[in-house]
Image: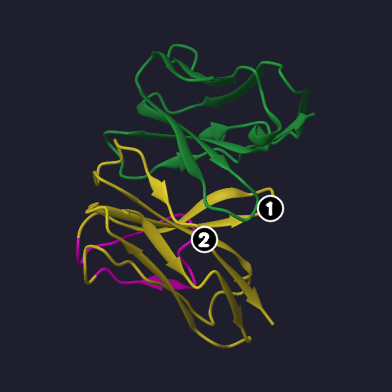
Amino acid sequence: QKEVEQDPGPLSVPEGAIVSLNCTYSNSAFQYFMWYRQYSRKGPELLMYTYSSGNKEDGRFTAQVDKSSKYISLFIRDSQPSDSATYLCAMSSNRDDKIIFGKGTRLHILP
Amino acid sequence: DGGITQSPKYLFRKEGQNVTLSCEQNLNHDAMYWYRQDPGQGLRLIYYSQIVNDFQKGDIAEGYSVSREKKESFPLTVTSAQKNPTAFYLCASSISPTGNTEAFFGQGTRLTVV
């Protein structure tokens, strides 16, 4: 089983819809969870950063962490064509120096 | 402005040549990382460094070398031993070397072997 699993997509949704992006993981030591957005031919930019379980909201974006299920989600409300990008989840633990990334989900918002 | 600068943006290499990719950060971060990104493969860790003069191999270190002589600089050399070097290379940094803070990325270097 891979440490972090993420559906590569592509995921196509109409403008204005709520988008749900997800990752599952196997390492119970992960405590720090991140979501990055990457436009084509650019470096990833950090969207959300959360510690342990719970929700975090920032504008149209909400990150959820369910450590009991080893499952994290990113919700995008009122999706816009400019949200079209690849979204990468990432996570790390106190015991390891490495940040582990999912393979990314390609998202297309259709105008 | 603070950030991470990678150069060059595009790089072409002839087979058998070594090339060095530059990564500089002015965020005063302790930890720096090099990732390789290929289509369908996600980000794969090449090397990482927690502090100056120290670095560790990541998952795909063969054919690569790094140095960390200064806190703000972490250059990556792609050697001729790397059999498939064409890829998008990303440098990142984070405040803490223990992995418990978020990483910030540069804009990447696209390396092509010609």
Image location (x, y in percent) of residue B74:
33, 66
Judging from the image, mark 2 belongs to the subunit labelled B
B49 left or right, relative to A73: left
Q: How is the image coloured?
A: by chain
Q: Could you say which quadrant of the image residue B16 lies in? A: bottom right
Provide the residue span drawn in magenta: B52-68
How many C-alpha atoms fall within 10 Å of the one at disc 2: few (<14), some, or many (≥20)?
many
Image location (x, y in percent) of residue B2:
31, 53
A65 left or right, relative to B54: right
In magenta stretch: residue A83: no
Name above or below for residue B56 compared with residue A20.
below
Pointers 2 and 1 within a single chain: yes
In this figure, which residue is indicated by the disc labeled 1? B39
Q: Residue at x 48, y 20 (%)?
A: A59
Q: SS at mark 2? A: loop
How many C-alpha atoms fall within 10 Å of the one at disc 1: few (<14), some, or many (≥20)?
few
Badge 2 amino acid: Gly
Badge 1 amino acid: Pro
In this figure, which residue is indicated by the disc labeled 2? B108
Q: Residue at x 63, y 19 (%)?
A: A20
Q: SS at mark 1? A: loop
Name above or below for residue B38 compared with residue B103.
below
Main secondary-structure element of the magenta-colored stretch: loop
Image location (x, y in percent) of residue A72:
51, 21
> From mark 2 to mark 1, how far is it between C-alphas?
14 Å
Of residues A80 and B24, which is closer to you in this image? Answer: A80
What chain is the green one?
A
Mark 2 vs mark 1, foreground winner is 2
Name above or below for residue A60 compared with residue B59.
above
What chain is the yellow one?
B
Judging from the image, mark 1 belongs to the subunit labelled B
